[in-house]
Amino acid sequence: MRAIWPGALLVGYLAATGILLIVERARVPPVGIALHFAVLAAIAAATWLTLVPRWLQLWAPLIALLFLYTEMPMLVRAAGHFSLFDATVIKWESVLLGGQPAVEWAAKWPSRLLSELLHLAYLSYYAIILSVPAALFLASRRGDFSDAVFALMLTFVACFLWYICFPVAGPRYLRAGTAPTGPIRSVVVWLLEARSSEGTAFPSSHVAVAVAQSILAIRYFGARGWFVAVATVGLALGAVYGGFHYAVDVIAGALLGGIVAGAGIWVVRRHGTRQANATAPT
């Protein structure tokens, strides 16, 4: 039964945001609305139709992530945000940290070696996203796979809903980065320019998801999971050093990822306990 939870969560999110798109359809292109509902139908079919291959049912929510991230600017416009909240976040950062580490850190420590190492850690995000689900899937731990994907999708949905309500561009859109340039940084910048969505800086979904995956990795794989946690620390530092996120984006992302992933684990454990009690002989 828990196998359908990630898909059901995603269907709920797409249905809710679909209502927003219909109500505010004058602000968004018709093709965007059509694509949104096409993905909704595809996820619903993958979740509940028995004709869909089992592997596709399990992986469909993760496959849909690229689309969900790409459409965020459209949802931000539909929500009526024609200006973003960077000024507010910068004020928070100045109060909490006394400056802007995303601007100042690389300028104070202009090391090409450090820059390349931290950008490599930042690039590890794309492996971190799939690390725990892939390991569980390959180990044929289907129940754990579904639980982990549910906690992961819960983290993503929490970030997406936040962006719709409080979009922030991030320092990369406001000023050029000061980190030394190298081959790895060039790849990261190219990826961000090709795939990033304006308005998705606070909280950092990269950090939120990486923290969630660290918790899940340690939960399911014990000491081996600390490799993901170490990569997550490097990713968080690279996000600031590279000028991609405000430091408060990273802090908020870490808190959100930890809280939401913990909540997701609690939900699936509670459901598993109830199922065990219901099937136990009396």
Image (tube, helix red, strand yellow):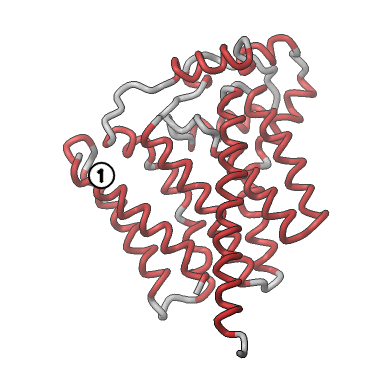
- Residue 216 in the image: state x and y as whole percent: 67, 54
- The local crowd at label 1, few if under 14, some if 14 to 19, many if 20 or more residues have their Cα within 10 Å, is some
Q: Viewer-proximal residue, 155 or 110?
A: 155
Total labels: the figure holds: 1
- Residue 248 in the image: state x and y as whole percent: 58, 24
Measured along the vertical axis of the image, is residue 173 above or below residue 184? above
Q: Is residue 134 left or right of residue 43?
A: right
Measured along the vertical axis of the image, is residue 34 above or below residue 93? below
- Residue 272 in the image: state x and y as whole percent: 59, 71
- Residue at the spot 50% in from the left edge and 30% down from the top edge: 202
Label 1 secondary element: helix
Measured along the vertical axis of the image, is residue 67 above or below residue 236? below
Q: Amino acid at mark 1?
A: Leu
- Residue at the spot 42% in from the left edge and 30% down from the top edge: 199
Quarter of the figure with residue 122: top right
Quarter the C terminus occupies: bottom right
State the residue position of label 1.
Answer: 20
